[in-house]
Amino acid sequence: MSTNISTNKVVHLDARQGELADLVARGTPCDGISPTAFAPLHLIRASEVSQPLPGVYRPCLCVVVQGRKRAIVGPDSYYYDAFNCLIVSVTLPMLGQIVEASPERPYLCVRIDIDLHEVAQLLLELPADIPARSDATRPLHVARIPTELQDVVLRLMRMLDTPVDLPVLGPLALRELWYRLLRSDMAPQLLDLMERNGSVQRLHRAIELLQQRYAEPLRVEALADAAHMSVSTFHTHFKAMTALSPLQFQKQLRLHEARRLMLSEHLEAATAAHRVGYESPSQFSREYRRLFGTAPRQEVAARQVR
């Protein structure tokens, strides 16, 4: 009897996973990140494995439906696949590497941006027996994806085929998604961020300030003040959480934004460099090459050829 129940569960999981893969594949006509009609929902596709590539992850839940990926922060690696999802609770520059993908079976992923205000509002309505806060150093967590959470993601994906439902049912499904997260093993990462006076929340305020003023000269004292920490304590906690110093963090934000301006808005390299706060084009080119592995003008030229 137990064997039959187990077999039925496997069949149900395979059917759900297969439908999710079909829906994401239809929503991603080419490799890269595809927006959807529901703003918090993004679809990702990659047809081949990759080298570790730099990127900026913002608070989100990543649910892989096919393939496998690795997120790298400092010396730590986080693998996630069709059975394990990734939650990121603060903005964080890191390396991402597709480790399982092919043209026949591409890497497919659903990324759902986390609205911290909505999560905080929902948290007020929950009973007090939610999981304890985390003592993890990094604001990332990989966990087995609960069946109930996967069901919500599937319903959200189905709604993309009936856009008339999205304005009403989309927010309801999203609210249920946050509820499922808060009732799962991934709750501690969100709770760390919700704790008003906790170190993660205070560092989050400093990171928000960095995001808003990344093009301005860095004043670590202002960041430490935003986190309500001394400068030395702020440095220690910031690097423990992000694996970067505040200056390195700012540089990566600048370089990623410059890259976006060049590739998406077609700005010249020198214009993009100035826009994000660089006064020296040669310094910009050196640091760009160090992060992305190629000179800015070469990357723009290569993209234009494609």
Image (tube, rainbow, N blue to C red):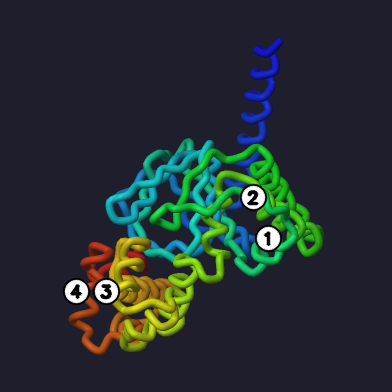
Which circle's residue, 3 or 2, is located before the other in the chain?
2
Instruction: Label 3: state its secondary structure.
Output: helix
Disc on the earlier residue, 2 or 4: 2
Residue 57, given in percent of the width and then of the height, sits at 45, 62
Q: CA distance from mark 2 to mark 4?
A: 48 Å
Residue designated by label 3: 297
The CA span between labels 2 and 1 is 9 Å
Res 254 → quadrant = bottom left
Left or right relative to 290: residue 131 = right
Label 2 crowd (10 A; few <14 / some 14-19 / many >=20): some
Find residue 286 and name its label. Answer: 4
- Identify the disc placed on residue 177: none
Of the image marks 2 and 1, the number of the one nearer the N terminus: 1
- Give the residue type at disc 2: Ile
Tell me which label, 3 or 1, sits earlier in the chain: 1
Nearer to us of marks 2 and 4 is 2
Element type at mark 2: loop
Name the kind of residue labelled 4 in the image.
Answer: Arg
Residue 225 position in % (x across, y down): 41, 83
**Residue under the image location 46 percent in, 82 percent down:** 212
Residue depicted at x 65% and y 19%: 6
Marked residue nearer the N-terminal end (4 or 3):
4
What residue is shown with label 2? 130
Q: Are marks 2 and 1 in contact (CB under 8 Å)?
A: yes
Q: Assign a secondary structure to mark 1.
A: helix
Please name the amino acid that badge 3 sits on.
Arg
The quarter of the displayed image where residue 19 is located: top right
Q: CA distance from mark 3 to mark 2?
A: 51 Å
Instruction: Give the residue displayed 37% in from the left and 61% down from the top.
Output: 241
- The residue labelled by disc 1 is 123
Relative to 167, does residue 80 appear above or below in the rendering? above
Looking at this view, is 63 or 90 the one in front? 90
